Image: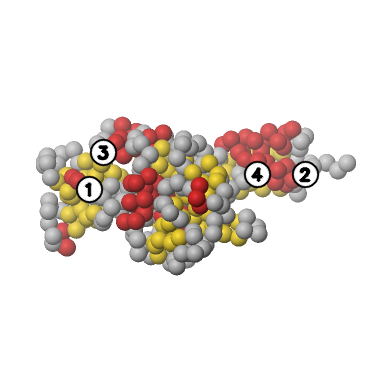
């Protein structure tokens, strides 16, 4: 029997510890051309993945020198612009992978030549211009988590910060804020019952009506509210489709689902194919569906998911296909569009894999 090679060991380990490259970087290589002792090179996002590789090579009796490394686990930053666009490679011509709104905490894997490779709270890994992220020291992140008064945008409409309270002068606009953006109350600003002065992660600050915001602890600890989730989705009706979009300015199909649940303090996986593997799986009979269930569509022959929507009632659902809109699962309806491959119920499954309450996510608190 032929001995297993180092490359074959890595292939097996990768399948076990990094089956989804969107969630785990596993860019390790085994160079067996260096003589009796090979060389393990490359990088992974998880120290546990590197250790699993080292252990597997040792178990296979393969002699090697370890020159691989894992990205740091404790480098963090905050998004500094209304919507940061992440790409699959470090170039503006790269495919849009996802987005993150102002104040979202992100793990910084590396910073090289004007681009950061980062991980978002849902686990997604992609590249973003470093100008979109404010790097924070461990002390600064702890202060942000524990020592600041943080507010979350929960107004379903656009929010603008201005340099003076209540100004309508466009030249006094400081920034716009999208739904679920996180800001901090500027501690040295004058108290006001109607207006609040908030600071952005890069130090800029401005005023907005206090009613636009919800304290982060209240937002993060909400009970599941299907009406709020559907209201959030419906508030975006007509918004244009953007591949990789994940804000209430424009979105893709899974982005709409994420945005709607996040306004209820729940973090879902990024892509439809990932969301389809979470929660309680249901069949194709829409009579059994409940409001808030996720509907998955695609290639029935291959079982490949390509689209997702949110069920409401009486065969009706909302989704983003070209734009955010409503359709029916009933083939006899005039606005029938698509039949489901299956559905997933989130109710009763919050806290399981891929369905995380913000209150339970360690990057926020």
Question: Residue pushed farthest right?
Answer: 1
Q: Residue at x 26, y 55 (%)?
A: 157
Q: Tell me the CA gap for discs 1 and 2.
A: 59 Å
What whole-number distance in Å separates the C-alpha atoms at marks 4 and 3? 41 Å
Q: CA distance from mark 4 to mark 2?
A: 14 Å
Q: Is residue 357 above or below residue 94?
A: above
According to the picture, the residue beneath numbered tag 2 turns out to be 5
Q: Position of residue 315 (x, y in %)?
A: 45, 56
Disc 1 secondary structure class: helix
Write the residue at 12% across / 41% down: 193
**Percent of width and height locating residue 352:** 50, 36
Q: Secondary structure at mark 4?
A: helix
- Foreground residue, 258 or 91? 258
Identify the residue shown where x is 66% and y is 38%: 53
Q: Which mark is residue 14?
A: 4
Which-is-in-front pick, marks 1 and 2? 1
Residue occupying image coordinates x 62% and y 40% = 17
Quarter residue 61 falls in: top right
> For the residue labelled by badge 3, is the local secondary structure a helix, a strand or a loop?
strand
Pointers 1 and 2 in contact (C-beta within 8 Å): no
Of badges 2 and 3, the one in the foreground is 3
Outermost residue to the front: 332
Viewer-side label of 1, 4: 1
Q: Which callout, 2 or 3, points at the residue further toward the start of the chain?
A: 2
- Looking at the figure, which quarter contains the C terminus? top left
Image-based side of 270 in relation to 359, left or right: right
Foreground label between 4 and 2? 4
Residue denoted by label 3: 215
Q: Residues within 10 Å of mark 4 (few under 14, many from 20)?
A: many
């Amino acid at each position: 029997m032929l001995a297993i090679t180092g490359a074959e060991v890595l292939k097996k380990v990768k399948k076990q510890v990094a089956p989804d490259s969107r969630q785990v970087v596993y860019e390790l290589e085994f160079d067996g051309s260096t003589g009796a002792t090979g060389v393990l090179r490359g990088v992974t996002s998880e120290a546990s993945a590197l250790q699993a590789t080292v252990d597997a090579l040792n178990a296979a009796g393969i002699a090697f020198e370890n020159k691989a490394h894992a990205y740091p686990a404790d480098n963090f930053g905050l998004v500094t612009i209304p919507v940061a666009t992440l790409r699959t490679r470090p170039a503006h011509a790269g495919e849009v992978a996802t987005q993150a709104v102002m104040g979202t905490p992100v793990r910084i894997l590396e910073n090289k030549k004007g681009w950061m490779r980062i991980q978002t709270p849902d686990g997604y890994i992609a590249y973003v211009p470093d100008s979109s992220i404010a790097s924070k020291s461990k002390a600064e992140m702890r202060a942000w988590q524990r020592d600041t008064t943080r507010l979350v945008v929960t107004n379903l409409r656009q929010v603008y910060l201005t340099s003076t309270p209540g100004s309508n002068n466009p030249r006094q606009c400081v920034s716009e804020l999208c739904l679920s953006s996180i800001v901090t109350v500027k501690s040295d600003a004058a108290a006001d019952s109607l207006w609040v002065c908030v600071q952005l992660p890069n130090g800029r600050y401005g005023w907005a009506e206090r009613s636009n915001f919800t304290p982060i602890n209240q937002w993060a600890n909400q009970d599941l509210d299907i009406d709020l989730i559907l209201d959030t989705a419906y508030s975006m009706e007509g918004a244009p489709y953007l591949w990789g979009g994940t804000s209430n300015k424009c979105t893709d199909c899974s982005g709409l689902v994420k945005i709607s649940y996040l306004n209820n303090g729940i973090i879902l996986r990024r892509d439809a194919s990932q969301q389809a593997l979470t929660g309680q799986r249901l069949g194709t009979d829409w009579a059994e569906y409940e409001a808030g269930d996720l509907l998955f569509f695609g290639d029935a022959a291959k079982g490949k998911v390509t689209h997702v929507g949110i069920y409401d009632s009486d065969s009706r659902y909302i989704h983003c296909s070209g734009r955010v809109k409503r359709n029916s699962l009933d083939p006899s309806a005039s606005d029938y569009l698509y039949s489901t491959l299956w559905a997933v119920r989130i109710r009763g499954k919050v806290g399981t894999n891929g369905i995380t309450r913000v209150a339970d996510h360690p990057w926020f608190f």
